Image: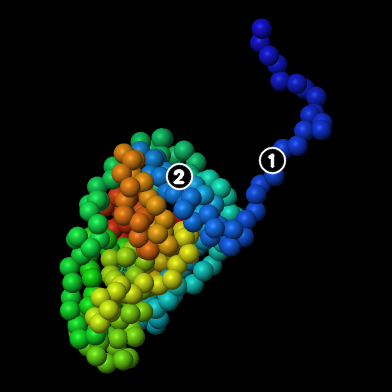
Amino acid sequence: MVLQRSPKPLTGVRFPQPLLLDKNMARQNKDKFKIKVAKDGPYLISGYLPLAKEKIVSNKQGESVAWQKIKDYPLKENYALCRCGHSADKPYCDGAHLKSKFIGTETANKQKYNECAGTLEGPELDLKDWPELCALARFCDRVGGTWELITKSDDAAFKKIAVQQACDCPSGRLVAMDKKTSKDIEPDFEPSASLVEDSAAQASGPIWVKGGVQIEAADGFLYEKRNRVTLCRCGQSKNKPYCDGTHIETGFKD
Ligand code: SF4
Ligand code: FES
C-alpha cells in the first residue's frame, strides 16, 4: 500500500523552533565546535560556531592595518560552507560542488606548526614563520615589515608594531614569541569563523578560523588545533584545506 501525505493541515503539532544562542552559550560549547572537510565537498560546521564577515582595513598606501567586523550571520547548530567557490548561496553550500565536479583533495602538510616553522631571532622577540600558510592578507608589510621589526625589537615602538602585525596575521603563518619567557604571543580569540573581505585586493578571501577549533580532514585526520588558521573557500588553493592567497590572483568574489 502506498501511503499518501495527508492533505489536511496538521493541527496540534509543535515543530522545533530555530534555537538562538548568545555568544556566552556558544563559548560553553567550546569543545563541541568542529569543522569537517567533506571529500570534494563543503566544510561541515557543527556546534553553533559563530560566523561573521570581517574586512581588512587598509591605509592610503594599501597596507593592511586592522580588522573590522561588517556582518554577523545567524547562529546555527550545523551548517555547510562552500569550499568550491561556485555556490550561488555563498557563504553556504548549495551543492554546486557536484555540478562543477570539484576536486578538493587536501594537500597541506599535516605536521605541527612548531615542527615546520623557522625562527628569526631578535633582541626581545623571536618570530616563528611557516611561509606555506600565508594567505596574502598583508599585515606584515608596514614599517619595513615584521621581520625587520623583530630585529629591532629592543625598541618599544617597533616591538609593539611587530607584535600587532604578527597577531593580525589571520593565517597563523607568523607567531611572535617573547624572548624571555619563550611563550607565543597570541591574540585572545573565542572560537569562531569569519569570512574575509579584502577590498584593497578587490577580492573575497578565506574563512578565518579562530580560537582553536578542531578541523578534521576528509580522511579523518585531526589537524593541529590552532588559534588562527585560514581555510580556502575559493576552491583554488594549492595548499588545501588552507588558503594560499590564490583568491587574489583569481579575483574571487562571494
Ligand atoms: S597571511 Fe600573515 S604572513 Fe601572509 S601576508 Fe598576511 S600577515 Fe603576512
Ligand atoms: S580562499 Fe584563499 S586561496 Fe582559496
Give the vertical position of 117 relative to 144 (above or below).
above
- Report crowding for label 1: few under 14, some 14 to 19, many 20 or more residues within 10 A (C-alpha): few
Q: Residue 112's spot in the image, x, y percent? A: 25, 57
Query: Can residue 49 be spotted in the picture?
Result: yes
The tag on residue 48 is none
Q: Residue 211's spot in the image, x, y percent? A: 43, 62
Q: Amino acid at mark 2?
A: Leu
Give the vertical position of 27 relative to 32 (above or below).
below
Mark 1 C-beta closer than 8 Å to ligand 2? no
Residue appearing at x 69%, y 40% in the figure: 16
- Label 1, label 2: how far apart the Cα atoms are: 22 Å
Left or right: residue 191 versus residue 201 is right
Question: Which residue is disc 2 drawn over?
Answer: 44
Left or right: residue 14 versus residue 228 is right
Mark 1 or mark 2: which is in front?
1
Residue situated in front as seen by the camera: 167 or 199: 167
Query: Can residue 92 be spotted in the picture?
Result: no
The image quarter in which residue 168 lies: bottom left
- Report crowding for label 2: few under 14, some 14 to 19, many 20 or more residues within 10 A (C-alpha): many
Residue situated in front as seen by the camera: 54 or 178: 178
Mark 2 or mark 1, which is nearer the start of the sequence? 1
Question: Which residue is disc 1 drawn over?
Answer: 16
